[in-house]
Image (cartoon, rainbow, N blue to C red):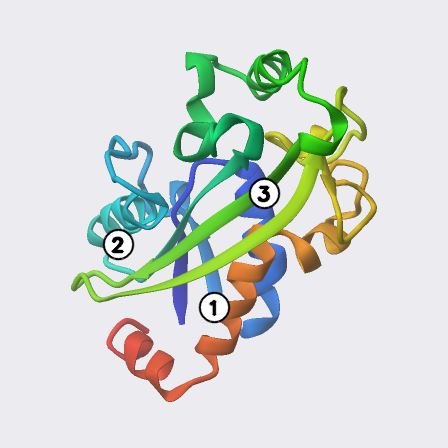
Amino acid sequence: MKLVIATANQGKVKEFSAALAHLGLELLTATEVGVKDFPEETGANYKENAAIKALHVAQLSGLPSLADDSGLEVDALNGAPGLYSARYGNLNSDSERTAFLLSNIENIETSKRGAKFVCSLVLVNPDGLSKSFWGEAKGTLLRAASGSDGFGYDPIFYSFDLDKTFSEASKDEKRKVSHRGHALNEFEAWFKTEEAKTFFSSHP
């Protein structure tokens, strides 16, 4: 069974591939099926944005496609950057967005720097049938980056589960407790059901 990972983010491609490799799926990237551009994410929430990407790739490739939309929600910023995490401050790089976020909470005391990563994962087949999954990871934000692995806001997100930042963690450690990891675990559990067999049956 073939499944397209509907993202242009290579960090996500690696996470998805590592997490799903043992399921016996033939995993393909959007580039490998000829999809180079993605539509604007105009959804009102994470699930809608993920569905926009997954449906776009599924219809162009003729194959079931899996996309996620995720964000970092900071308590002191009333949930921002949230849905706009990947384009926060209209800045172009992870390091710039991270620096901008840190500047916005510079005066927030340590005990009030709580945050959580959230992830909506949506699977769509070419006919438009969809299934969604959800994951969260709670932590707090440091005052400076720590660690060299990961991507996005990982260097400043201190995980309560790991007692280290996502950037300090190994890929396996992060995957076990991350928002995307929890959503992928939901997907894996569902994949073993009869409903999943039916979902994939018309698209070998």
Spatial separation of the CA atoms under disc 1 and disc 3: 20 Å
Residue at image location 37% in from the left, 88% down from the top: 194
Q: Earlier in the sequence, mark 1 or mark 3?
A: 3
Identify the image quadrant of the C terminus: bottom left
Q: Position of residue 167 (x, y in %)?
A: 75, 36
| Label 3, residues with CA under 10 Å away: few <14, some 14-19, many ≥20 | many
* Three-letter amino acid code of the residue under disc 2: Ala
What is the secondary structure assignment of the residue under circle 1?
helix
Left or right: where 20 falls relative to 8: right
Q: Position of residue 15 (x, y in %)?
A: 60, 50
Observer-side mark, 2 or 1, equals: 1
Left or right: where 120 falls relative to 75: left
The one nearer the camera, 162 or 53, is: 162
Q: Which residue is mark 3?
A: 116
* Picture quadrant where residue 20 is located: bottom right
* Three-letter amino acid code of the residue under disc 1: Phe
What is the secondary structure assignment of the residue under circle 3?
strand
Q: Residue furthest left?
A: 127
Spatial separation of the CA atoms under disc 2 and disc 3: 30 Å
Q: Which residue is mark 2?
A: 58
* Three-letter amino acid code of the residue under disc 3: Lys
Q: Which residue is mark 1?
A: 187
